[in-house]
Image: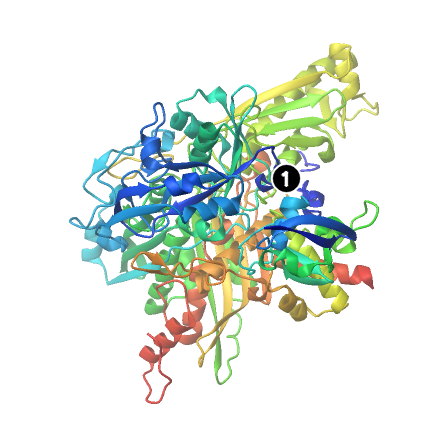
Amino acid sequence: MSKTKIVGQSVHRKDAARKVTGRILHVGNIEMPGLLQVAVLRSPYPHARIIGIQKSRAEAMEGVVLVLTGAEIAAMPDVDPYFGPAFKDQPILAIDRVLHVGDPVVAVVAVDRRRAEDALELIEVDYEPLPVVLDVLEAAKSGSPLVHQEFKPAGVFADLDHMEAGEKSNVCYHFKLRTGDVEAAFREADRIFEDTFTSPPAQHMPMEPHVTLVYLDEDEKVNVWTATQSPSFVRTQLSTTLGLPMNRIRVRVPYLGGGYGAKLYGKLEPLVALLALETRRPVRYALSREEEFQTITKHGAVARLKTAVKDGVITGRRCEVFFDTGAYADIGPRIVHKSGYTSAGPYRIPNVRIDSFCVYTNKPPAGAFRGFGVPQVIWAYESQMDIISRELDIDPVQFRMHHALEEGEPFATGTPVHSFGLKESLEQAAEAIEWSGPRPQNNATKVRGKGIASGVKAVLTPSISGAVVMMNSDGSVNVLSSTVEMGQGSDTVLAQIAAEELGVCFDQVHLVQPDTDVTPYDTITAGSRSTYHMGNAVRMASMKIKAQLFGVAARALEANLEDLVARDGRIFVSGSQESGMSMRDVFLAKFGSLGTTIIGEAIFEPRAIPTDPETGRSEKCTEYWFPSASAAEVEVDLETGQVKVVKFLSVGDTGTAINPRHCHQQLLGAAITQLGMTLFEEMVFEEGQLLNGSLLDYQIPSVKDLPEHFESILVEVPHETGPFGAKGVGETGTLTVSPAIANAIEDATGVRIRDLPITPEKILRGLAEKDPKPGRAEVPQ
Amino acid sequence: MKQEVLLRVNGRDEKLFLEDADTLLEALRDHLQLWSVREGCGVGACGTCTVLLDGRPVSACFILASRVKGREITTVEGLGKEGALHPVQEAFIEQRALQCGYCTPGFVLTVKALLEENPSPTRAAAAEYLEGNLCRCGCYPDILRAVEAAKEAKD
């Protein structure tokens, strides 16, 4: 491949100046005459029947325009009162029952937010409490209280075709993988290791909470401005919800104040669209931070691993993973499928049996979160890799290297792996932490240790990205893409790809922000898929423009097509001293007129072979893999149990880095979030009530939580079909953080923590159990 | 009950009609359309709505507008002169100290205040001062580099 000019350069973000001045557009900044605001009355019970709602006093309040209940929505002709990406299980407002604390019950629309909130206090709802199920393992058992009496598939996404309607169970999806004979492996094993690892529900915490604005334009079209990562899906959802053709709904997305998976699929949009249609006025609903906690969470999970070892080699592994998807499935089933099939690890294990379950409970719904369930399973298998290697007295890095899959070898699903920089990532992580170097020094009360972990995630497949690229007669370019710029830098990377392919300057490429009237379908902005999928679509569309430009230039320059190159906004014969033609000249030669445009469009839609419903096997379950490794050095205070991460390295196989500096930023940013998830983040529930549902009580990492040494390393194993060899990187840095730290803590203290987050209390308890000494300080339970 | 409140914002006197319960955040956004001031938590815990009050960073969501009459309020809209960016803003761009950018105005103002109080903070001192501003994209390493760069620009 010839050397690239813009791809591979760490050009600056397109949106940086607008962000440091605060001028960037967010949904919260949009002004509109007569704009109304929303407040929502939410359930105080984790599970209850709604007996009656009295709302007339609220309706009579000055400034209140509308008070709406779920029963009224259910009675509306043409409106589908239920929504959801996997199952249609979530009512726009609760209809007859509430299923978690914070479930929306009554919506008030008023002239301002304060009046809407005041009106909530005038609404009375009578509830009859119902039996509650909160624990994921209890919920999965037959005979436990049912969250849903039945569930029906939404039928929107091709990769969720295998969702089945069901009833009389809280398990709404069960993924199975069967490779080899795992029972025989256990019979023949020298050693069997059984461990259970847990991860709690947690918060995405985008600094911008969910916000949606809907108005009807002069053509009565439903116009939606919303902070979503999935504009195309939102349009489809609203079309179903409202019973309107897709071209009567326009979804636009400005810049997002963070997403991390929280802003996927339908969230506030069905409700706000109905409120705008009912009031015939513009309506905005901006969630408070407290409501954010009740709207979407990261899946809590319990993973049980049973691993057979013979002659120092893993011969079989059984994984049972229970994902707590809360009261509504959201995208839980896809998480259970995609992370489920990776839960035995990226290792050569001949006999594997995996069962992963998507389980309803009476908690707030859980959905996609940066890493998509994979950090929860890597937490399990990478903790156990260390437990086994320590027990067998084998070096943990060597133990992983021995089992790590290599190019072309089959994953547990049977899919051969390609562009699989797992071993390289492990080697780089080990070298950077000086794995074979001397042990770190301890002192009397503080001990140090090192840990390492590796793992892999597979990109969602199949999925679809469409792009339209439009070149104007001055050589400037508009890229029409539904990829949402939420901080990850997609505007910049896609512009780099278009500029490289078209041979124009980076500054000449402008990204048109998602607008379903204008930008083509894209599955989602999530799952580390945009650089690869939308990048390929933009590149293919650019190639079509280039073909037209070259056709004109070849005639004008009397040159062969294959000798032409485009660079710096000009087209010329490769190797010739002639300056060739400017884009303007080409347009004049083609059209004889300025102001004209050439358009290229492309749809990139890599396919998968669906995993077999009984064996989970597929010759191609994913388009690409992104391996990760982390290395940590920790210092543990034996008196307080405090963990300080002294040194942390995040290593990721990104394929060719389109913008290396931004890849580093993705790896480190993801790692910081996951440091929080590892050491302190947890939504704490008591009888279904969230105890820490505000930023006063729920802590996320601040600048003071940064490790002293904190670096990232890119392993660039080019992907054959990636745009210029690129893969994705948004989630890579989350994958292996937690087990690397837990492994370092065991190295330092001998204490093995199996339940996230790793709090000082758990470490002190572990130290006390390991070495019970009279007189040791009381350990809180 | 609405009352007339005189606020001094970005060097201008602004006469607003506010309710007693209106926060400074509401006054700046809803009445003056200063969109850089954004609510992140509503309880003064995330720093996203940071403004400078007589040069010191405060959370605008947690202060009643009527309590800061006549005091000097600065938002990022008030930074920079004649269209040029403030050196702290330049440093944030140069060091790529942002991703989604939602928290960025709060960080820029806090760093400006830090460097005015302490023109040459250590990394630890900078981290201490910035602890109340949260960035979920995790740009902290880049933000600390931006502090260094802005510090040098001032030298």
Q: Residue furthest bottom?
A: A775
Compared with A669, A107 (above or below) is above
Q: Quadrant of the C terminus of chain A?
A: bottom left
Q: Quadrant of residue B131?
A: bottom right
- What colouring style does the render use? rainbow
Please name the amino acid that badge 1 sits on.
Answer: Leu
Q: Position of residue A210 (x, y in %)?
A: 50, 44
Is B106 situated above or below A226?
below
Question: Would you call the spot at circle 1 few (<14 residues within 10 Å), some (14-19), or many (20 or more)?
Answer: some
Nearest the camera: A260 or A12?
A260
Q: Tell me the subunit letter for badge 1.
A: A
Residue at left offset 23%, top offset 62%:
A190
* Residue A158 horizontal side relative to residue B36, left or right: left
- Where's residue A206, x and y in %? 52, 49
Q: Position of residue A440 (x, y in %)?
A: 52, 75
Q: Which residue is mark 1?
A: A25
Which picture quadrant has residue A751? bottom left
Q: Name the residue at 76% across, 65% down.
A: B116
- For mark 1, give the secondary structure: loop
Q: Is residue A765 left or right of residue A205?
A: left
With A53 as the anchor, is A265 left or right in this view?
right
